[in-house]
Amino acid sequence: MSKFAELGLADSLLNAVADEGYETPSPIQARAIPPVLAGEDVMAAAQTGTGKTAAFTLPLLQRLQEVGRTGHVRALVITPTRELAAQVEDSVRRYGKHTKLRSCVVFGGVKINPQIERLKRGVEILVATPGRLLDLHSQGAVKLDRLELLVLDEADRMLDMGFIHDIRRIIKLLPTERQTLMFSATFSKDIRELARNFMQEPVEVSVTPPNSTADTVKQWVFPVDKKRKPALLSHLVRDKQWHQVLVFTRTKHGANKLTRTLEKDGIVAAAIHGNKSQGARTRALEGFKRGKVQALVATDIAARGLDIDQLPQVVNFDLPNVAEDYVHRIGRTGRAGAAGHAYSLVSADEADQLFGIERLIKKPLPREEVEGFEPDHVLPEGRPQRRQGRPQQARRGGDSGNSNGNRPPGRRRRRSRRNGSTNTAANRESSGNR
Ligand code: AMP
């Protein structure tokens, strides 16, 4: 039985999941799907990228397909943006392709008449942004009085964007007897208040680990120029004699490219990500577990389902865009009291992601430059300034010092500039300054 089947999903949905190439439910799916299927209200803390859309869409489809097509709106998903609405409806179609249920998406900024026409033909699942939904309702184009299931997606963003009044108005149009699901990146005070007012004893599920990193994981940042990251990684694998390292990249393309480079450098590597066939993924994982593959290069979502814990080290070849993913990634090492090491190769353009991670884990990550790989583009230090666009890439001047490790950002950096010292990992190691 597939792991999705263990969650209680029907064949029509299991087939759709298999068509997507998903093998293992992501943590939010594993935790949210059973209570949603059981008819509970669910409040879930999950970010984009965790597989949250399937976490509510799959059980939603299953609950609705028991009755099938009725021609009236039985489930409503409200999202803060048009883009998200379109994406969610696309997922509803894909996951629901073996059911007879119909869906449509409505949002502002485009003509309303085609949406009115579409609604007239009958839909069971409506995905909408708040303003346009209220417009359509006031024109009599949509009825919500037989709604069975409401999903508030990215509820925290909806509040941030000032949609609270619209949401209240929408909820007044719905039957009180209904199932309500709320997905939010965080459970702030306002979100909890929303839940208190509109949900019935919600089950809380969360996949965001406590935003602290295990003390048993030693973490370092290796500042390095972007183009030199592959060479630095090969150097580390050889120099530190890593026999088993899990390497994270942000993209599938990046994973493939890095795997090829490592192979060229004589390191046995394999990539694992969503575009790989099941066979290829299983082979890569087996090879890695048995020690035949030295470096397993994975994207975040591919790594989520992997049953590989207690690795001696993980490497962030790219920093994740979502800071919580950093915590997930490094949680792969140093489990159950075993010592683990997490190394992040960070280029100057990733300063914002780094600051986001440091804010989340509430401590600066120690930096060390690796001899021979000192960056030309200095990784900025200190608290992030509120600014638009990409961080500035300061060129290293002839007299500037290198970055220090294990210290609060800012002050000491300037001190090291003044005395012009170099402070490479090798230097510090020999001076005992670690
Ligand atoms: P979401 O967080 O819903 O935006 O999903 C992020 C990405 O993960 C989407 O591209 C999904 O297609 C993909 N995804 C969702 N669930 C799984 C899964 N169980 N296994 C692999 N990929 C998944």
Image (tube, helix red, strand yellow):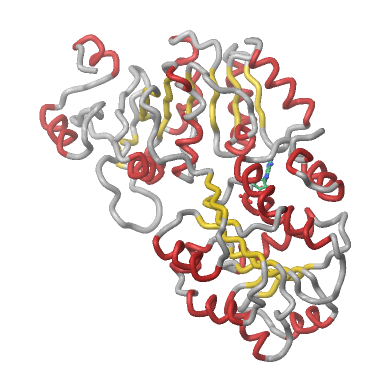
Q: In this view of the protein, which residue sits in the foreground, 370 or 300?
A: 300
Residue at 61% across, 83% down: 134
Left or right placement of residue 89 versus residue 342 in this view = right
Q: In this view of the protein, which residue sits in the foreground, 34 or 168?
A: 34
Up/down of 401 relative to 197, above or below: above
Splitting the image into 4 quarters, where does residue 256 fall?
A: top right
Image coords of residue 322 (percent x, y): 48, 45
Image coords of residue 9 (percent x, y): 78, 47
Left or right placement of residue 67 versus residue 251 in this view = right
Image coords of residue 379 (percent x, y): 32, 37
Image coords of residue 214 (percent x, y): 40, 28
Splitting the image into 4 quarters, where does residue 177 fall?
A: bottom right
Q: Quadrant of the N terminus?
A: top right
Residue at 21% across, 22% down: 422
Q: In this view of the protein, which residue sits in the foreground, 293 or 394?
A: 293
Left or right placement of residue 74 versus residue 130 in this view = right
Residue at 60% across, 26% down: 297
Left or right placement of residue 20 versus residue 223 in this view = right
Up/down of 46 relative to 190, above or below: above
Up/down of 164 relative to 395, above or below: below
Q: Quadrant of the C terminus?
A: top left
Residue at 86% across, 65% down: 67
Up/down of 407 relative to 17, above or below: above
